[in-house]
């Protein structure tokens, strides 16, 4: 049985990837009982209508169905190379590009956050997409108020780094961090379009 945390992560990943996986067929995006889909945006804000009002046994049945479908979806997404996982985190991309601030917003709207590697395994999980799409990706790391010193977006000090030789450079001018196709990092201006990679 999926833990509640994993269940919610997979549900967020599924909703984030719906437009990518649907391939232009919004009418059949996620045929799970209890889900309502609106044609104008593909997803209802209250997507499990009346879920709490179900009797105990019926609600348990719906949860089991959802867990089963999410478990199958996770296997399919892994097989298709649309998600990767490391250290209990799930990483996903919709294949689109955006600047740093739009990436942070898009990942947040999906219930996740911008991909932020905290060890070599997580770096490799993000690198998979960078290589697959042959596009650099922004990471959840920014320059602090001290030029040349970088930190996680939550203000924590970097406990893991994978800087490209002679990086970071451009002190004060390049506040964001991107991942190259070899997995190393470079500091960059935040207004460039890079592959959107989120973590859940």
Image (cartoon, helix red, strand yellow):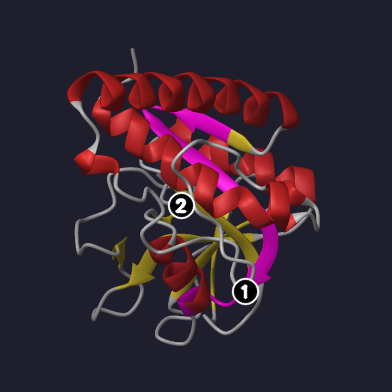
Front one among 15 and 66: 66
Taking the magenta stretch, the answer to whether it contains residue 151 is: no
Identify the residue position indicated by label 1 in the image: 40
| Residue 47 in the figure: left or right of residue 194 | left
> Where's the N terminus, which quadrant?
top left
Residue 57: x percent and y percent? 24, 18
Q: Main secondary structure of the magenta part?
A: strand
For this rendering, which residue is in front, 65 or 17? 65
- Seen in the image, is 73 located left or right of residue 174? right
State the SS at label 2.
loop
* Residue for point 41% across, 65% down: 109
Image-quadrant location for residue 156: bottom left
Q: Tell me which label, 2 or 1, sits earlier in the chain.
A: 1
Tag on residue 115? 2
Q: Secondary structure at mark 1?
A: loop
Left or right, residue 155 beside residue 189 = left
Q: Is residue 56 above or below residue 174?
A: above
Q: Single out the mark in the foreground, 2 or 1.
A: 1
């Amino acid at each position: 049985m999926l833990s509640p945390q994993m269940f919610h992560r997979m549900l967020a990943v599924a909703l984030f990837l719906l437009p990518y996986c649907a391939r232009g067929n919004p009418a059949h995006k996620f045929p799970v009982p209890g889900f309502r889909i609106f044609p104008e945006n593909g997803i209802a804000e209250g997507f499990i209508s009346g879920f709490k009002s179900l009797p105990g046994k019926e609600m348990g049945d719906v949860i089991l169905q959802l867990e089963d479908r999410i478990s199958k979806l996770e296997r399919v997404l892994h097989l298709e190379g649309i998600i990767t996982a490391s250290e209990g985190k799930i990483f996903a991309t919709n294949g689109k590009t955006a600047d740093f601030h739009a990436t942070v917003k898009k990942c947040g709207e999906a219930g996740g956050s911008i991909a932020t590697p905290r060890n070599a395994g997580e770096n490799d999980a993000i690198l998979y997409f960078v290589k697959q799409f042959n596009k650099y990706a922004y990471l959840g790391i920014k320059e602090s108020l001290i030029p040349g010193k970088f930190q996680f977006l939550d203000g924590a000090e970097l406990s893991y780094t994978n800087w490209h030789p002679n990086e970071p450079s451009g002190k004060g001018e390049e506040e964001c961090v991107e991942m190259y196709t070899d997995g190393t990092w470079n500091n960059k201006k935040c207004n460039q379009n890079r592959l959107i990679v989120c973590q859940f």
